[in-house]
Image (cartoon, rainbow, N blue to C red):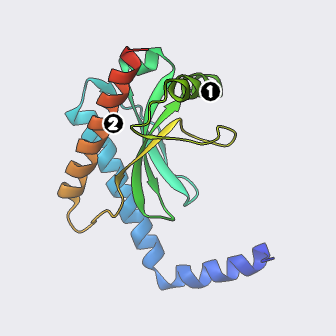
Amino acid sequence: MTTLQELMLVYQQEMKKGAIQQAYRGLMEYLLSLKNHFQTRHPEFSVPGTFYAGYMDMSYFAIVPEDLKQRGLKIALVYLHETGRFEVWLAGVNKSAQREYWEIIRRAGWNKYRLVPELADADAVLEHSVSARPDFSDLDALTEEIEKETLAFIGDVRAFLAGV
């Protein structure tokens, strides 16, 4: 088992190289600009001020259509650091809402998107990859790709829920 001391020595060595700090700063700046993009381009959604930078596991912000908010649901636009991909998640505002809608989707057999297999430690009900291999060399194209996939996901979730 690796001790915290051993991990910290590796961490310090990597930090001395400087690339991690630059990449992380660039990623955080991009995510905040993406959040701003959704706030500006989609006033029909609430994009709360909260931005979760995370512990280098995931970083995300919420996009909340009013009809989902009334159901205790929200959309999370997530960057997964380890795999380097963007996902969009349907999540509950609390564990109770999350459990309720997980059961509704599971019982309905709706499988357009990945239903999380277990709710115990899950942060989402549904997950969908919106950019599996993001190209950070063209941020405008990346933003367009993420926006298109996110809006399609939101539309599909809203259509499904309108029928239940």
Identify whether 103 is placed above or below 147: above
How crowded is the residue under tag 1: few (<14 C-alpha within 10 Å), some, or many (20+)? some
Q: Nearer the viewer, residue 134 or 53?
A: 134
Q: Nearer the viewer, residue 123 or 116?
A: 116
Give residue 29's quadrant in the image: bottom left
- Give the residue at mark 1: 99
How crowded is the residue under tag 2: few (<14 C-alpha within 10 Å), some, or many (20+)? many
User: How many numbered discs, if any?
Assistant: 2
Q: Position of residue 71 (x, y in %)?
A: 48, 16
Q: Residue at x 80, y 76 (%)?
A: 3
Which label was assigned to residue 56?
none
Q: Amino acid at mark 1?
A: Arg
Q: Position of residue 104 (x, y in %)?
A: 54, 22
Query: Helix, strand or loop at disc 1?
Result: helix
Residue 101 vs residue 41: left or right? right
Q: Residue at x 54, y 29 (%)?
A: 106
Q: Position of residue 21 (x, y in %)?
A: 46, 71
Q: Nearer the viewer, residue 6 or 134?
A: 134
Query: Helix, strand or loop at disc 2?
Result: helix
Residue 72 vs residue 42: left or right? right
Quadrant location of the C terminus?
Answer: top left
Q: Earlier in the sequence, mark 2 or mark 1?
A: 1
Identify whether 86 is placed above or below 155: below
Give residue 94's quadrant in the image: top right
Q: Residue at x 70, y 39 (%)?
A: 120
Q: Residue at x 59, y 25 (%)?
A: 103
- Give the residue at mark 2: 153
Q: Amino acid at mark 2?
A: Phe
